[in-house]
Image (cartoon, rainbow, N blue to C red):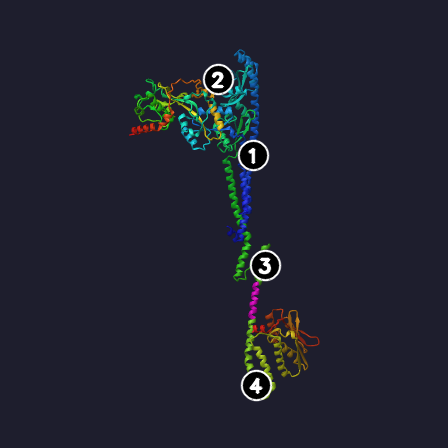
Amino acid sequence: MRAWIARSFRNRIFITVLLVALVPLLLCDLLMTQLMIERSEQTLRREAQTESAVLGEQLDALLGRCTETTQSLAESTVTRSALRRGGDDSRTLYQLLHRSRLELRGAADFEIYDADGQCLYTTAAVAPAPRSIGWGVLCAARQSGDALCAEDAGLTGAGAVTASGGGILGYVVFRMERTQLDAFFAPRLGGADEAMLVDRTWRMAYATQPLRAEETLAVLREQLLSGHALTGGGEDNSYYVRRCDSSGFSLILRQPRTFTVQAVRSIYFVAGVMGALCLVLCLVCAWWLSRRLSGPVDELDSAMRRVEGGDYDVRIESTRQDEMGRLAASFDRMTGEYGQNLKRSVRHERELNETRLRMLQSQLNPHFLYNTLDCMKWLGVTNGATQVATLATDLAALLRAGISGSEYILLEEELELIERYLDIQEVRFGDRFVCEIDVDERFRLCIVPKLILQPLVENAIIHGVADSDEGFIKLWAEADGGDLLLKVSDNGSGIPEDVLRCLNSHETIPGGHLGLNNVDRIMRLSYGDSYGLSAYPIAGGGSCVQLRLPMQKGDDDAQSSDR
Amino acid sequence: MRRILPLLLVVLLLTGCGSAGMQDVSSFAPAQSERLVIFTSHKEKVYRPVIEEFEYRTGVWVEIETGGTATLLERIAAGESGCDLMFGGGADSLSAYADCFVPYVSPNAADIEPEYASSDGAWTPFSLVPIVLIYNPKLVRQNLPTGWVSLLDESWRGRIAFADPAVSGSSYTALCTLLQVLGGDGETTLAAFYRNLDGRLIADSGDVVTAVADGSCYIGVTLEENACKAIDEGLDVAIVYPAEGTSILPDGAAVVRDCAHEENARRFLDFLLLPETQESLASELGRRSVSADAISALPEITAVPYDFDRALRERQILLKAWHALSGEGET
């Protein structure tokens, strides 16, 4: 996966977009679901707690009043005398009992038992069976004065009636039957809630819904004792417990859970389906976006690969206005220039080769001429014609220099060749011109292309001196920054205007002047376009031709490597 | 991945919040000093009023586990049962597991008739359960069974409901009593009785009453308690107290050694022996009290002195002889 992500820009975008879109979405999905459930459960919980608190308080109050009434009945002289005498004054006692019952709005029935557990008086329609005095509520009442007990589907409280001597005369009992408890609970319970009343060890006293209440209570009791949460054996109900402090009874409120396991499961299912849909949507979006974003990069990448393969005609031609568009334009420009440069350098190479070929061709003849000249020199020496011998010697030296292997020589060697050339021209022109070579010692070891000055001097003689009897030619060197300037001036008629223009704009000079043309081309091919030949007229007649070339100091080693 | 991990944790935390919304009820749970774990082999009709009254009086929370005597005792013997008190089980069974119990003599034990008391105090007797004969009054009108000797009467051949003594403790006691009462040569009597059963044995002692009530058997041997319960339920069963007398099995309760709530277990034993508890046995629960003074609504019976130790000692031999007979009967 990591490798797949790292492999391409597009995959990175894809994963990033996917994560950026999906993670917050899923988080929100989960959070909303969770919050919704939590929130509504909290509300329900609060309601249930309020409800059980109210129920507990009211039940406590009711039981308190029942107990109080029982106590006051137990202490009443009417009760005592009735128990002592045995039914003589039953009318007064019944009045008292019924009044007590009515004061409690029928919430409980009152009964009076004798010391053996026989029921003597009751407000209930049916007289209850005798009670064991050694067991249950009467026993507890005898021992502690009053007692409260859970009995089959109801509550019973008792108070002992004691004689002035301390003996037990009988018992006053209040009894809350199922119907009476139903009447208490039914209006106070909300919705589908159910309540259970249990004694202090959680044995059943009453349940609003008796069906399966015993089993549920058994499960709850076990859960309480084992320290588990109260679930009552299922997941569909919540249980809330409230202890009624005065009676020791506990109220267990059962509230159906709105979010049953099933409901929660279906909510999560919907959330899951939504998540899955989002995932699909994000996948599609991420795919589309990554393709769109990485398109230009891919294009650039493939174009670059084609360029690497040698295709310089590749153009991206993007219409975009952004960075990608600019990048594409730069790429186009770059490949274009690169292609042109390549073409230009190929053309340069070809031209240089052609020129060299031409020079080689022109060097073929000099070999023959050199041999002939050598022959002529010896003929001159043997026949006493010294000028012929000198001419032949100089010409031979020039020719030898022309056909020797090295392209570059030291300036002093070049000047030597120039002197030989001047010797020859002296024989031809006699003393019609004077040539002064004034090159400073420091330039003498500079490297120059071979025979590069000869066409300049020839040009000066032909154009400057040929028509005059007092020609003066001067050759000197100057340094100009890192460049070497070699200048040849004459005092002749000057160079015609159009020739000057052609020279300075490096165009081919029409008619003759092949020598100057060649010099200029060689210089520019060898050193670049900023070098070459230029010419300008001199005030007072004559002109000066100037050769610009880079200052390269050579020594014997450089020369030998050139060779 | 390392960057995603905290995110996942947050998600887990959020999802975890949902389930923790219930009321904390631990404050309602009783302290250890207010608890008691009771294993009981009694029927719910017996144990429930007793335990609920104990809870009502003391406020101790009793956890009840029910089961067969043998199963519960084996669990206790295996240890780690969590049980504090074994409530129920015949004196012979409790004696067999005396090692698992802490001897305790309740201050209320003075009233116990000495023949039913445990010799070493390992267990405390609770109630007495005589073995009785039953018959179906609709099917048996003449020649009613009178006592143990009726079981050898040929006229009941194949019509006697008797549980397998190898499985049922009460059945084994009945067998011993039969041999003891009828005297003579034990093996002959045993063989005669077995022949009279005609190879018919009831698998579970609880089904003896049913077998008689539904008419598949005419007479049966069972505990008085079961018979009384059946009569209460309106089944066609009548009780005959054997004329020769019968063995009366005390059942008891015992405090488990090294239990967690020993103090409460002792309180429970004290409670069992209270006069009012013993009185309620006969009046409410259809059982006989171990207390000499208790008034009982049940008819007076003649007790045959039953030698537990001998019964325990000779159990293997007797059962072997029994099995030998049953093997014979099958062939």
Chain ID of residue with mark 3: A
Q: Residues within 10 Å of mark 1 (few under 14, many from 20)?
A: some
What percent of the width, then of the height, locates residue A132?
A: 48, 19
Q: Compute the Cα span from label 3 to label 4.
A: 70 Å
Q: Compute the Cα span from label 4 to label 2.
A: 176 Å
Residue under disc 4 on the same chain as residue under disc 2: yes
Q: Which mark is residue A330?
A: 3
Q: Amino acid at mark 3?
A: Ser
Q: Compute the Cα span from label 1 to label 3.
A: 64 Å
Which residue in the structure is indicated by mark 4?
A378
Residue under disc 3 on the same chain as residue under disc 2: yes
What percent of the width, then of the height, locates residue A544?
A: 67, 75
What percent of the width, then of the height, locates residue B111?
A: 45, 20
Residue under disc 1 on the same chain as residue under disc 2: yes
Q: Earlier in the sequence, mark 3 or mark 4?
A: 3
Question: Magenta residues: mostly which secondary structure?
Answer: helix
Q: Is residue A491 left or right of residue A383?
A: right
Could you say whether the residue bearing mark 2 is in a helix, strand or loop? loop
Could you say whether the residue bearing mark 1 is in a helix, strand or loop? helix
Q: Which mark is residue A130?
A: 2
